Amino acid sequence: MTGLKMPKDFLWGGAIAAHQAEGAWDVDGKGVSIADVLTAGNATTPRTITDGVIAGENYPNHHGIYFHDTYKEDLALMAEMGFKAFRTSIAWTRIFPNGDDVEPNEAGLQFYDDMFDEMNRLGIEPVITLNHFEMPYHLVTEYGGWRNRRLIDFFVKYSETVLKRYRNKVKYWITHNEISNQANISEASTVQDFLVWTNSGLRYDETATIAERMADMYQAGHYELVASAKVVQLAHQINPDFQIGAMLNVSPIYPATPLPTDMLAAQKAEQLRKWFSDVHIRGAYPSELEALFERTGYRSDITDEDRQILKEGTVDYLSISYYATFAVKAADGKTPALDDPSSIESVKNTLIPASDWGWTIDPEGLRYTLNQLNNLYPNLPIMIVENGFGAYDTVTADGSIHDDYRIAYLSAHIAEAEKATIIDGVNLIGYLSWGPIDIVSAGTGEMSKRYGYIYVDLDDEGHGSGKRLKKDSFNWYQNVIKTQGENL
Ligand code: P53
């Protein structure tokens, strides 16, 4: 109990993504996406990217939780919890199966017409992501993913099609999900391989150098930002009431010690990720990045027209995901630098607890990060569009699920979000928790890494009845929303 309460029009709800929930990966003309060629992994084994869809492999996104066929029942449960908003994505491959098709696929467009109608009927505001780790696989095999400038036009065409089609049904849009993930070049290469794949459709073998990866990542990121800015401009022409948001994963990075070199390591590590929001929000690259490009030649393809588009296509709000925080130190004998990610070493933060997947639990970090963002971009509306606790759940004999650990995580985080909003004056407009219904994990492909208030009876191999069960957190969240966050 914090004694704090969110404003009446605050957008409480939850968020998912098409590829993690819908299944129906090849029906009604849908094309293969980059999520459709990802096998299942777990906490210790990474997912692998296969060359196309191979018979006999386990591809969890092919079935998801069958949301394609169950969304009406599932949305009814969200409405029962009192959701004001629900975030999902449009699967690009339902609309343009190959990404470079001349005409959109009407069956795919109709599917989302029906889904958005249902949300509006239930009084739930749709928050729709255009690009959530599910670009057409064909754009990778034919064009090399986002390292190719032509992707801008393909994305803009797809976006224009859906922005026009749903102009009276959806107000809140997000261009690219967690665009900053791919900048984690210092991570172990398996993690890095995964993140540039999901963000940009980039693929490497072990011969690729860090410099090559950095050059590609900055170039791909640039094209994505130009594409986003073009979409922002178009969207405002299509419907001036549209709210178009950027989306970043924000994970504060702490210095391992108060040593000045560790402080610098933390600052450089943050600069490696933060520039995406500067471009989205201020319409220009921060000077430390321009200086880096000057020295290294990374992001070599930028035109005056690009710069103009970036300047004119700034977003209306910032949406964020927040799960965990990190700590870094200066690598032995090195001065932390953007040019050399190995100069910044990740360390385990042993002062705070972590989940079974090693994700730290840091509610105060959320307040810290909201304040930091508000200082960078004063008064900009911010929406939390992902936050939650992936955990193993146990169904007891009577079918109940006692997920007090999830309630503890969420309640502590919401309390800090309330302090940031009410005490610190951050312009927070919504809180959408991740995976209000269990879905396939993006990072591991598991079903058993569960975030939901609603349990889905499916296991990591896709076996199970698919039945939905309310966890203890269901009633808890219903009460949180009912009391505007007063009863945590
Ligand atoms: P999972 C990496 C780092 C932070 C968030 O993640 C990430 C990732 C990629 O896995 O993903 C976001 O399912 C993403 C969602 C995803 C969610 O966080 O690996 O936007 O699609 O499901 C949680 O536990």
Image: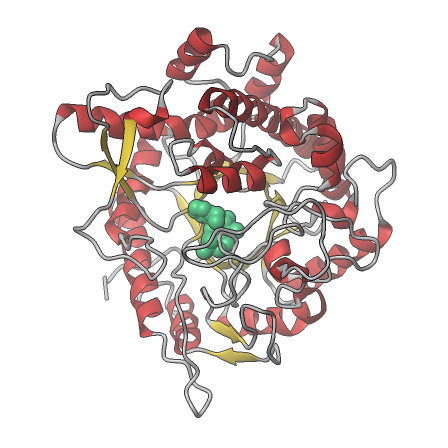
Would residue 273 be found to the left or right of residue 135 on screen? left
The percent position of residue 56, horizontal first and vertical second, equals 69, 62
Tell how many labels.
0
Is residue 9 shown to the viewer in this render?
Answer: no
Q: Relative to 82, is 334 above or below?
A: above
In the foreground, 62 or 204: 204
Which residue occupies the foreground of this view, 120 or 90?
90
212 or 440, nearer to the observer: 212
> Which quadrant of the figure has residue 348?
top left
Q: In this view, does 255 lie to the left or right of 466?
A: left
* Quadrant of image for the N terminus: bottom left
- The quadrant of the rendering that contains the C terminus is bottom left
Q: Quadrant of residue 77?
A: bottom right
Q: Vertical placement of 271 versus 164: above or below?
A: above
Res. 208 visible in picture: yes
The residue most toward the left is 258
x 32%, y 74%: residue: 404
What residue lies at 44% left-to-right and 92% top-to-bottom? 398
Q: Position of residue 144 (x, y in %)?
A: 68, 29
Q: Position of residue 378 (x, y in %)?
A: 36, 31
From the top left corner, tell me how far across and down residue 267 is, in percent: 27, 27
* Residue found at the far front of this picture: 207
As drawn, is 439 to the left or to the right of 453?
Answer: right
Q: Which of 65/470 is in front?
A: 65
Instruction: Give the residue at x 35% y 67%.
Output: 406
Relative height, residue 247 to residue 351 (above, below): above
Q: How is the model colour-coded?
A: secondary structure
Residue at 34%, 35% (x, y): give it.
Answer: 374
